Amino acid sequence: MWKKAQKWETSWWGNCINTYGEEYKQLLYAEKMGLKTFHDDKSPFNIDMKGKSVLDIGGGPVSLLLKCYNVIGTVADPLPVPQWVKDRYKLANINFVSCKGENVDKLKESFDEVWIYNVLQHTEDPKKIINNALKMGKILRLFEWVDIGTNEGHPHNLTKEKLDEWLGGEGIKEYLNGKNTCTGNCYYGIFTLKGDGRP
């Protein structure tokens, strides 16, 4: 089922050239995950990570790390992205690792932060990915869509109850009505091994 979902996801991204729609939604995800943007006279969509190391699980071809300053970034994603996407990450000093979220623990690194946004419904074992994230980072910033059902590209139906259980904390569930073209129930929070989930 996961391999079929990956084929769907690869087809959805296509050549990765026009990704503005997804990046526009990511700005909302970033806000909900407690990330603050600033204007650098060129773009209002910059994030200063103040030298922190960040693992973005499932960041795909346009990770939020591409909008970050002062970051030691790694993107882990199994998506077969075009070479120019890998070159872009390299130019931005972001490490792109072709790796499933279920296997990121094999990186044998620790990070100040781990980010997961709009990813878990696409995966093979979302609970394992959360376990990995909580062990590998001091904090986990998370945004996911919930109660959307399943389809060919989304083999998991996430719920607040499941996510609270896996995270060992309590996240925020909110209905979004069209902001940044996002509509539906979402779940977000900032988590540690101790739980909490509040941004």
Image: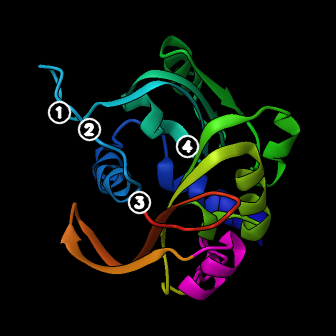
Verify whether residue 58 appears in magenta.
no
Q: Given this view, does label 1 or label 3 mark the residue nearer the observer? A: 3
Query: Foreground: 10 or 178?
Result: 178
Q: Which mark, by number, is residue 29? A: none
Q: Earlier in the sequence, mark 2 or mark 4?
A: 2
Circles 4, 3 touching at the beta carbon (< 8 Å) = no
Gap in Å between the C-alphas at discs 1 and 3?
21 Å
The picture places residue 170, in percent across and down from the top left corner, at 55, 77
Which of the 4 image quarters holds residue 191?
Answer: bottom right
Kind of element beneath mark 3: loop
Task: Tell me the chief SS of the magenta region.
Answer: loop
Three-letter amino acid code at disc 4?
Answer: Gly
Residue at which label 2 appears: 37
Placement of the C terminus among the 4 image quadrants: bottom left
Circles 1, 3 touching at the beta carbon (< 8 Å) = no
Query: Foreground: 47 or 176?
Result: 47
Verify whether residue 153 appears in magenta.
yes
Q: Given this view, does label 4 or label 3 mark the residue nearer the observer? A: 3
The picture places residue 76, in percent across and down from the top left corner, at 67, 39
Residue at which label 4 appears: 60
Gap in Å between the C-alphas at discs 2 and 4?
21 Å
Q: Which mark, by number, is residue 44? A: 1
Q: Which of marks 3 and 2 is nearer the N terminus?
A: 2
Kind of element beneath mark 2: loop
Residue segment shown in magenta: 150-169
Residue at which label 3 appears: 199
Which of the 4 image quarters holds residue 153?
Answer: bottom right
Whether residue 34 sits left or right of residue 95 in the image: it is left
